Image: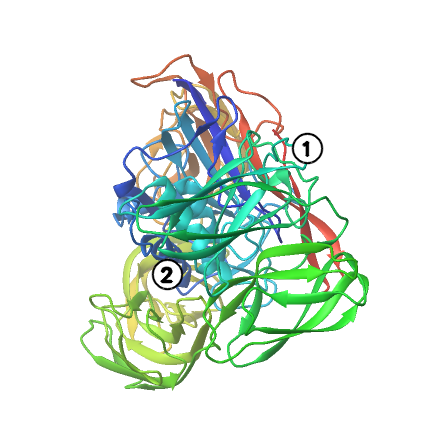
Amino acid sequence: MVRGKQVSTVVSLLLLVALAAAHVRIVYDGNGQAIYWNNPSSVSVVIQSAGSDNINDGSDEVALRNAIDAWNDVTSTTATLVEVQSAAQKARTDWQADDIHLMMFDESNQSGYFGPSSGTVAVTPLTFYTTGAIIDADVLFNGGSYQFTTNGQSGRFDIQDVATHELGHLLGLDHSGVAGATMFPYVDPSVILHRSLSADDAGGLRHMYPAGSFGRITGSLFRSDGTPVIGAQISVRDSTGRTAGAILTNSAGAFTVQALEPGTYSVLAVPMDQPVSSANLSNWYTIQTNFGATLMGQAVVTEGGTSSIGGQTALPNTSLSLGRSFDDFPQRVIMGQTTTHLLRGAGLVPGSTLVASDPSIAITPTGWNGSSVQFQVTCPAGAFPGHFDMSVTDPLGNLEILVGGLEVTPPNPTVTTVSPSAAIGTGGAVISLSGTGFRPGCRVIIGDQIYEEGQPGGAVLVSSTSLRLVLAPTFGGLHDVVAMDRSGVEGRKVNGFTVQANPVIASVFPAVGQSTGGTLVRITGSDFQVGSSIHIDGAFQPLVSVISPSEIEVVTTGGVPGGPYILTVQVPTGEVASSAFQYESKPDPALTGVSPASGSDKGGNTVTLSGMQLHSDLEVVFGANPSTGQGGSLAQVLTLTENQIEVSAPASSASSASVLLRDTLTGQAFMLPGAYTYIASSQSHVGGACGSVIPTAPPGWRDLLSAGGWLLFLLVICLGRARRGSLAALGVRDH
């Protein structure tokens, strides 16, 4: 769209498996300006109400809310994500608008980012002034190409894991070279540990939006000939060996690692070559990799102080490497257990050694194969949680370090009993959970409610085997009871709790259908449950889909013309809601196509609608609510035949819009949701410079903007994971 301001757009895309850089800010490559929010204390986000087509119990919204909490739980920063819960805002789909920051699932590529065979799992478009100030940011999930889950279904992407990563981009963070960090740029369906933030992620947020006094470490890295090493990844470990933060050296080889707690740190430098690549960063960064992993010494950090390690000399480059983009990161290590792992690389030959940065974590290689190493990790029960490096040394003494490749977590919690196991949905009941592995900072999820330990209204940690909470108002149905550790690992009692609530029908659209059946009817309301049954005039309707606790779709079987008949929704717990429906002998209208499928938000352009059973009793509405048929704007009918209607599109705000045919005599209707896209015309913004054309989707991924450019962080599918029979990815960036 055309904007009367000097802006650029960054598109941060989450792909399928792993590559990275260090804690790095997104930088506009036109002038090197890091992007930021002018008012970070209240960055609004809206969870779009439609949710994911793969989730019908409302848990997708809970997962997105957990992702928001992950960033809001970071202390000593001014940044806060504020969820807007207005029903009107949640119903919006116009993610292009500057006044709303949506988290939404794009199920039919209405955004234009997710083409056929797309390797992109999610995308965060950011629009900003060339000063770096962010104007707009949204998170879009590729619901058309990929399936999502909240309960660990095999082959599906974990919503909370993906969303936590994308919200880091929304806040201004680039990808991270810490292999276990949330901002590591690739995901895999088997990984959920990006749900929780690494120390590097939290440090990045504090660096961008500081509050409080932290220490920092400075220094420089040079080659033996005195030339600076540019774009080296500098990582620091705390006294336990945990990865505490990372940064890149600048054009002079200098660095400052920010946002460090007081303590003693070890400093090291590694080249960003494997499993890291410069292709995963903003184009502004220069990355040099022709040096070897280098231990740079120690630094003592005090509160608010700066500790310098001075200039250090990098070791020569080697061919040794550990970790590849198609490995799963982080590699999970469980307290008190021995786990088996495999990593790819180069130069991984017999006689090499492999150690963790915490010496209490024992690594036992079981097979050196040149291009891979198999090993077991034994972790003591009392190990510190967090991310740890792995270092490999070959028989010649060459060193390679995989930063943050291991993540130590507790065992999965378990939920064995829930007492009582049922309560009314108005809330107030005291619920006790028994199980194992409950720890400070955990959270309990029942229905659409989150009970975070230690927070007002949250769960009370009685012991490691007992939690207690007061039930908040929640929707009816049979719910899993989930205990989630702060690391992101979880235990759940499937169907462990029943919320007793009467379903309510708010609308039936359309409320009239053809007597021969086949009418798609959308029912909105509350407290609908998976397994609900629908009857019309006593006749069972077998084609029912529970979209969410607030929406059901049913395709009618037909009946005798007349009515109104009683339509009932009965939930599995027995409660019933009723409304009205009637049958007409007249056939329903139908739409099969809309051409063109887009036009100016000012309206007035001619649009041709193709379909069947088109007649003069029909009115055409653009932008009606796709669930209720309410609202929208009437289009002027220009010409009409039995199979085609030409209309003049009404004006509307920039967004995707439904196209509705409605019989003004009978009330029968047919709708194509999202069939037409309004494109914003020229707008005026105070403080702007020259205008730039910002397309609603990357035009061919290559068109340049007059005052900026697209930075695309892409995940592209490859077919390289024979060991699991699943898809992996490698990183590609276009600009």
Compared to residue 217, the image places residue 382 above or below, namely below
Q: Which residue is at the front of the view, 541 or 32?
A: 32
- Identify residue for label 2: 62
Residue 227: x, y in percent? Answer: 64, 30
Residue located at (48% from left, 31% from top)? 27
Figure quadrant of the N terminus: top left
Quarter of the image where the C terminus is located: top right
Q: Is residue 204 visible?
A: yes
Q: Secondary structure at mark 1?
A: loop
Residue, disc 1: 225
In this rendering, would 153 be left or right of 507?
right
User: In this rendering, would 96 be left or right of 190?
Assistant: left
Q: Position of residue 344 (x, y in %)?
A: 73, 59
Spatial separation of the CA atoms under disc 2 and disc 1: 55 Å
- Disc 2 residue type (three-letter): Val
The furthest residue to the top? 690
